[in-house]
Amino acid sequence: MPHELTELRLDPATRPARGSVHEFTPDVCVVGAGIAGCSAAIESARLGRSVVLVDSLPLIGGQMVHSLIGLFCGVFGNAPEYVQLTHGVFDDIFASLTSAQDLYFSRSHTTTVFYNEVALGRWLERTVRDLGIQVITGAVLGDVVLRDGFVSSIDLATRYGDVRVRAAGYVDASGDAALTWHAGLPCWEPSRPIYGSQQVIVENLDEARKPDAGEMDAAFAARGDEFGLLRRGGLAFFFPGRGTAVLNVTHIDAPLDPAGAARAMFDGRDQADAAIALLKSEFPKAFGEARVRAYGFPGRRQTRWIQGAHQQTVAEVRSGFAFDDAVARTAWPVELHDRSDGYVWEMFPADHVHYVPLRSLLPPGAHNLVAAGRCIDGDAAALSSVRVMGPCSAMGYAAAHVLDLAAKQRRQTFGGTDLDSLTSVHATDTELLRSRLAVNLGALDSPGGN
């Protein structure tokens, strides 16, 4: 007589007529789990706040992990001092990945930091888990309820059912201002494309025979049209001793419609393949045996961003204007990719630092919403210099402290009663905030107003 394979019982199940909603009621909800969102979530948790971290991808890490960018930009100042301008999670990441030989520092006009994206992704996962941050991945943002200037709840759709989050404060670190947009608050969109990039990791390279950046640019300029490429220049970031490189050699559109986004991804991969064919032809000693190890998710630079209480200008970036409500700093060049064949690259002198004001993170129509990362308010050129990972991380760190201060001020104002909402983030005590953010601001001399 045959034995039963299993005693597992099957229970009948039918979706309820109204469906079930999973509800979360944290202190802070962060939408977007890239560098800005992860920084905001981690710092909020370290401040003792309960946190829900949401992302549309099935994994956390955003573009810094899944677009295969491969290097941190904007964390350090310019040569010859190379001052570290942003700390926070970077100190922890640097310590962890350096000890495992998954990170190295490259110095030229500034310090860029090359990293192993797999190791970084695992560090993020372990860190948010150990801090008790609740993570909701594969979540598509739906209805956002804005009542009397406060975001009271957001609805998410996931493959595991609908989700509602009712938080005291929110961080829009979505990159495309998704939370602000769904709340019905004003945003900006560029009148012509600002191109993203399809990154790709290639292997089987001979690092000893790699071309320099000028040689690669010349090859793309001379033969890009022959290979059907838009961008006529590019970079290969070699990871020492591994025979691999991240290629940043494409320009792809970054549309905000779903079918267009998928098309752009396919087109980007075609461009990456064509670029590899060009490199094999021009530099056979280095790239002759190259093959693709992985394509990243399409990289997006500037798509849609908030209309904030202040729009940062490129004049403020160039002058290094010291805002009285500064929350982040960087020395990264203006890097505007609004031409299909190239981009603007405006570098700054050795002692230059420019700042990001809190007002550029705050939509005027919301009292408990702070933007962080590449969707803050700036003109296109200004935003192109502060949307890189260093200042984006500092903005997320600052957003956590802004919401924490608003919660404390609320309890003090109402005699210690722990109420659901905050006082307005627009009423933040900027002097107290600056003292909390000193690690990312340094000696901010002679702050001004604007």
Image (cartoon, helix red, strand yellow):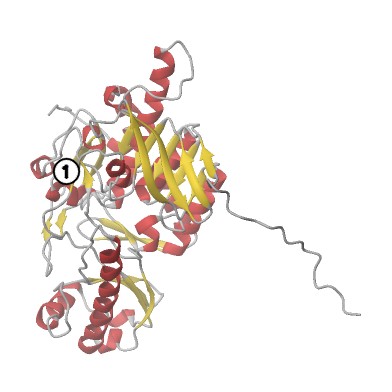
Above or below for 297 versus 38: below
The residue located at (24%, 77%) in the rendering is: 271
Q: Residues within 10 Å of mark 1 (few under 14, many from 20)?
A: many
Above or below for 109 versus 247: above
The residue located at (44%, 17%) in the rendering is: 411
Above or below for 269 versus 142: below
The mark tally for this picture is 1
Above or below for 380 versus 207: above
Which residue has dot 1 on it? 378
- Where is residue 89 drawn, in percent x and y? 41, 45
- Judge by depth and name the residue closer to the eye, 162 or 214: 162
Say whether residue 167 is visible. yes
- Judge by depth and name the residue closer to the eye, 42 or 101: 42
- Where is residue 281 drawn, in percent x and y? 22, 89
- Where is residue 12 drawn, in percent x and y? 69, 58
Helix, strand or loop at mark 1: loop
- Where is residue 325 drawn, in percent x and y? 23, 29
Residue lying farthest to the top in this orientation: 415
> In the rendered image, which quarter is residue 368 located in?
top left
